[in-house]
């Protein structure tokens, strides 16, 4: 709602003529509640948990846990790649985003303090028989919409580019 005030424009025969003038920024109606949605989760308030999954390839369910005292919201796909150390260059292609019919649609997930969001990470180990596979020791994971990554020890084989062997699904409530 914008504030209006009346300004005297002219005097004609002793009668004031007024016109409305809009000034200042829009002001929220006090009867309307403020937006109280939690902010987007940032890497600094999260920890990465290896979760559970197959010991040699297959499906893994990894978790982001809110390690802060404030709720936050996460939505979308993590970034996942294999490397040979926490700051090393990716080996092979990063994980593709699974938007198939069986995959969850990206939707907001609110993480209360101590709460978690999980995501499915899928590897295709059988393909390493069809390439000159490279050994990796680290899994690098970026939370959705973040540029600071986490890493986990991850002894695995991956085919060099351009073969795609990794798939990631959108985060869901854990």
Image (cartoon, rainbow, N blue to C red):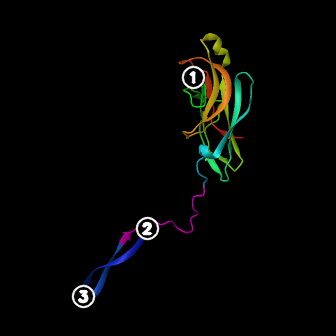
Q: Specify the farthest residue to the left.
A: 13
In the image, the segment drawn in magenta is 21-36
Identify the residue under disc 3: 13
The kind of secondary structure element at disc 1 is loop
Identify the residue under disc 1: 91
Real-space Cα distance between discs 3 and 1? 86 Å
x then y, percent, for residue 23 = 38, 69
x then y, percent, for residue 109 = 65, 45
| Closer-to-camera residue (147/54) | 147
Identify the residue under disc 2: 2
Q: Classify residue 107 as left or right of residue 58.
A: left
Real-space Cα distance between discs 2 and 1? 56 Å
The kind of secondary structure element at disc 3 is loop
Q: Is residue 81 shown above or below 22?
A: above
Q: Is residue 124 shown above or below 13?
A: above
Let me know if residue 22 is in the magenta part. yes
Q: Are marks 2 and 1 in contact (CB under 8 Å)?
A: no
């Amino acid at each position: 709602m914008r504030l209006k005030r009346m300004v005297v424009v002219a005097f004609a025969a002793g009668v004031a003529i007024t016109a409305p003038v809009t000034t200042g920024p829009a002001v929220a109606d006090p009867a309307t509640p403020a937006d109280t949605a939690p902010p987007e989760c940032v890497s600094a308030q999260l920890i990465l948990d290896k979760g559970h999954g197959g010991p040699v390839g297959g499906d893994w369910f990894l978790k982001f846990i809110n390690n802060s005292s404030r709720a936050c919201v996460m939505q979308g796909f993590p970034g996942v790649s294999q490397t040979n150390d926490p700051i090393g260059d990716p080996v092979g292609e990063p994980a593709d985003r699974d938007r198939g019919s069986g995959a969850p649609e990206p939707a907001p997930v609110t993480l209360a303090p101590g709460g978690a969001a999980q995501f499915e990470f899928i590897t295709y180990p059988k393909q390493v028989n069809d390439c000159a596979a490279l050994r990796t020791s680290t899994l690098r994971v970026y939370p959705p919409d973040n540029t600071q990554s986490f890493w986990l020890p991850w002894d695995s084989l991956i085919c060099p580019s351009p073969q795609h062997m990794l798939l990631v699904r959108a985060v869901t409530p854990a």
